[in-house]
Image (tube, rainbow, N blue to C red):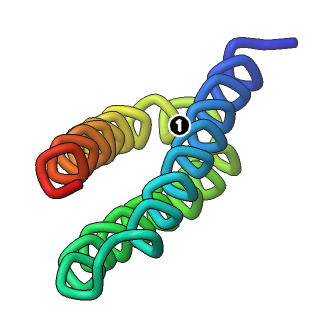
Amino acid sequence: MNDKELYQQKKQTQLNEWKTGMIQFRTQAFAARTHLQLELNKHVKLLESKLEEGKIKLAELVKMTGHSFESAKKNFEIMWDSIIVAFADTAIKFKALT
């Protein structure tokens, strides 16, 4: 397995773990009182869109080769960091609201 494949596998694993966490957030939001459900669902939808963006960008990145891959990888990492922050923020907000 080459470096690119290992990179893709690592990022895909992280996306899968985040998706599992998002499902847990969605379950908590569903179980919350009605007035909290709206607030929690807003955070879940934001996280869902970030994860979908990550999935799409990872698929695009994997198709690239050579120098274009390395260049795009830097931009991908910036976007990836925004997912990490969004996931952490969602976890904090869920903890505070539930």
Give the answer, above or below, for where 10 lies relative to 1: below
Tell me if 11 is positioned left or right of 98 in this view.
right
Q: Where on the picture, by quarter, is residue 75?
A: top left
The answer to whether residue 39 is above or below residue 52 is below
Considering every residue shown, the one lying at the far front of the view is 33
Q: Residue at x 21, y 76 (%)?
A: 36
Q: Amino acid at mark 1?
A: Phe
Q: Nearer the viewer, residue 4 or 25?
A: 25
Name the foreground residue: 68 vs 43: 43
From the top left corner, tell me how far across and down residue 91 is, in percent: 27, 43
- Give the image location of residue 14, x and y in percent: 57, 32
Residue furthest right in the image: 1
Q: Which percent across, then down, holds residue 53?
A: 45, 65
Q: Quadrant of the C terminus?
A: bottom left
Question: On the picture, is 69 further left or further right than 94?
Answer: right
Identified at 57% across, 47% down, the residue is 61
Q: Residues within 10 Å of mark 1 (few under 14, many from 20)?
A: some
> Relative to the observer, which residue lies in front, 4 or 36?
36
Residue at point 45%, 70% (across, down)? 31
The image shows residue 50 at horizontal and vertical percentages of 37, 62
Report helix, strand or loop for mark 1: helix
Which image quarter holds the N terminus? top right
Number of marks in picture = 1
Q: Nearer the viewer, residue 43 or 59?
A: 43
Side of 17 where 78 appears, left or right: left
Residue identified by numbered label 1: 69
| Quadrant hosting residue 92 | top left
Residue sitting at x 26%, y 68%: 43
- Left or right of residue 65: residue 90: left
